[in-house]
Image (cartoon, rainbow, N blue to C red):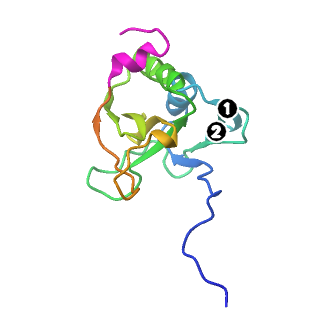
Amino acid sequence: MKKQTSSIDARVRIGHIHLKVADLERSLKFYRDVLGFEVTQRMGSRAAFLSAGGYHHHIGLNTWESAGGSPPPSGSTGLYHIAILYPTRAALSDALRRVLRAGIQVDGASDHGVSDAIYLRDPDGNGVELYCDRPEDKWPREAGGQLAMVTRPLDFDSLLEEISYKI
């Protein structure tokens, strides 16, 4: 009899997110104009799909059930945040520069040992994490090999120096 496993295939990935938004144009200004995602398809004024690098879509935005709506109240269940993985620290630095230039408030920034992360909110109040991973061989581990993630303040100046940009 074949041994059953409870592990998921290591090749599985989260493919895309689809967000209900109150105002499509306002959300496009954030995801397209600030973060730099490209619109791959538009469905009039009701929906848009965006990607990085020509993929069919990483982010879907729609107002089908939410036009003019308000964010869910704090303390309710639902999405905590989406996490956008940048391929390099320099790319994350560029994202931070874009956010700061747009005047968007940064809610927090952390060095997790395995990654550097910046936290903010989109125009509908959805949490957004912008992050880059460190090489896996640099991840902090306990003596038994278990991950030992941490939450330390992220050094903004060091991150911004990645692209020679100062606040």
* Tag 1 near tag 2, CB within 8 Å: yes
Q: Residue at x 55, y 28 (%)?
A: 88
Q: Which residue is mark 2?
A: 48
Instruction: Give the crowd class for mark 2: few <14, some 14-19, many >=20 residues within 10 Å.
Output: many
Q: Residue at x 44, y 9 (%)?
A: 165
**Which stretch appears magenta?**
155-167
Give the farthest residue toward the front: 143
**Quadrant including the C terminus:** top left
Q: How far from the left and from the top, in percent, is residue 33? A: 55, 22
Rendering quarter of residue 59: top right
Dot 1 or dot 2, earlier in sequence: 1
* Secondary-structure class at tag 2: strand
* Secondary-structure class at tag 1: strand
Residue in the foreground of this view, choosing between 69 and 136: 136
Q: How far from the left and from the top, in percent, is residue 136? A: 51, 43
Q: Which residue is mark 1?
A: 39
Work out whether residue 105 can be spotted: yes
The amino acid beneath tag 2 is: Ala
Instruction: Give the crowd class for mark 1: few <14, some 14-19, many >=20 residues within 10 Å.
Output: some
Q: How far from the left and from the top, in percent, is residue 112? A: 36, 40
Q: How far from the left and from the top, in percent, is residue 45? A: 62, 37
**Left or right: 159, with 110 as reference point:** right
The amino acid beneath tag 1 is: Val
Q: How many marks?
A: 2
Reply yes or no: does residue 159 show up in magenta: yes
Q: Nearer the viewer, mark 1 or mark 2?
A: 1
* Mark 1 and mark 2: Cα distance apart in space: 7 Å
Residue in the foreground of this view, choosing between 44 and 135: 135
**Quadrant including the N terminus:** bottom right
